[in-house]
Image: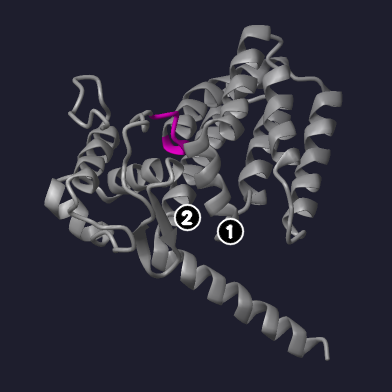
Amino acid sequence: MQDTSPRSNDRLYQDLARKLIGELSAGAYPVGSRLPAERELAQQYQVSRPTVREAIIALEVQGLVEVRIGSGAYVMRLPGKGDIAGFNITAFELTEARLLFEGEAAALAATQISDEEIAEIEQLVREIARENQEPSGTDKADRAFHLAIAKATRNQAVFDTIERLWELRYTSPEAALLHEKARTANVKPVIEEHSAVLEALRARDPAIARAAMRTHLAAVLDSLLFATEEKAVEEARAAVAAKRARYTQATR
């Protein structure tokens, strides 16, 4: 059986995930049953709703629950002896780290960047906009945009750190799952935010570049919270469908 006891170095979501795993092991929620709603769990365990979301994602990564859009989290299986209550870096932790590092990287890049690098970053903003128009668009241009800024710092340690943070976005199961949910909810890179960073770099203003990057990544954090709101996801899909329907009618 898993060790579900809280650890002194646990983050809140990890502590809650262990408690929920303990509840599953004790038979509180049989296979096929629905976990209490996010709001109920937040009240029951006296934690924030984002903490509940991170805990549920940790359980989902382990295959213990399945989150069904507009319905809730359902128990898929009960914890077994071979299960280990392990945790990886979450999308929230990762984006918080990016906000700290990439904000300063943008400020440093503003003092070092060349005209050629600005032209490259400007082209990447256009590429991000193009990718946003594709139903199955990737985040390749977005990644290239941020790494181009890191490269413009002329500091290899800064570049390596930011590159590693981007790798974790794909290799950490929790982070990868939440970013996939964001894509499903039609959350895509915001061109205006990237353009604001570009213009700050073009002006060679480190303070504005730092602020623009931090504003952008703070908005990414908000979008990740949005992506985990079951109702918001459902409403986003409905809005996209309605927009497409209006566009189809207008072009007939």
Q: Position of residue 18 (x, y in %)?
A: 25, 36
Q: Give the residues in magenta.
A: 87-92
Q: Residue at x 43, y 65 (%)?
A: 232
Front residue (pair 60, 93): 60
Q: Identify the residue under disc 2.
A: 227
Label 2 residue SS: helix
Image vertical order of residue 17 relative to residue 99, above or below = below
Magenta residues, dominant SS class: loop
94 within the magenta span: no
Q: Are marks 1 and 2 in contact (CB under 8 Å)?
A: yes
Horizontal arrangement in the rendering, residue 199 relative to residue 117 (left or right): left
Query: Is 152 drawn above or below residue 234 in the view shown?
Result: above
Other residues around mark 2 within 10 Å, as few (<14) / some (14–19) / many (≥20): many
- Percent x, y of residue 178: 50, 46
Question: Is residue 91 within the magenta segment?
Answer: yes
- For badge 2, the amino acid type reads Ala
Give the image quarter of residue 171: top right
Q: Residue at x 71, y 10 (%)?
A: 154
Q: Is residue 143 above or below residue 125?
A: above
- x 40%, y 59%: residue: 229
- Residue furthest toward the front? 81
Q: CA distance from mark 1 to mark 2?
A: 8 Å
Where residue 184 is drawn, which disc sits there?
1
Examine the image and state in which quarter residue 20 appears. Answer: top left
Which secondary structure lies at badge 1? helix
Q: Quadrant of the C terminus?
A: bottom right
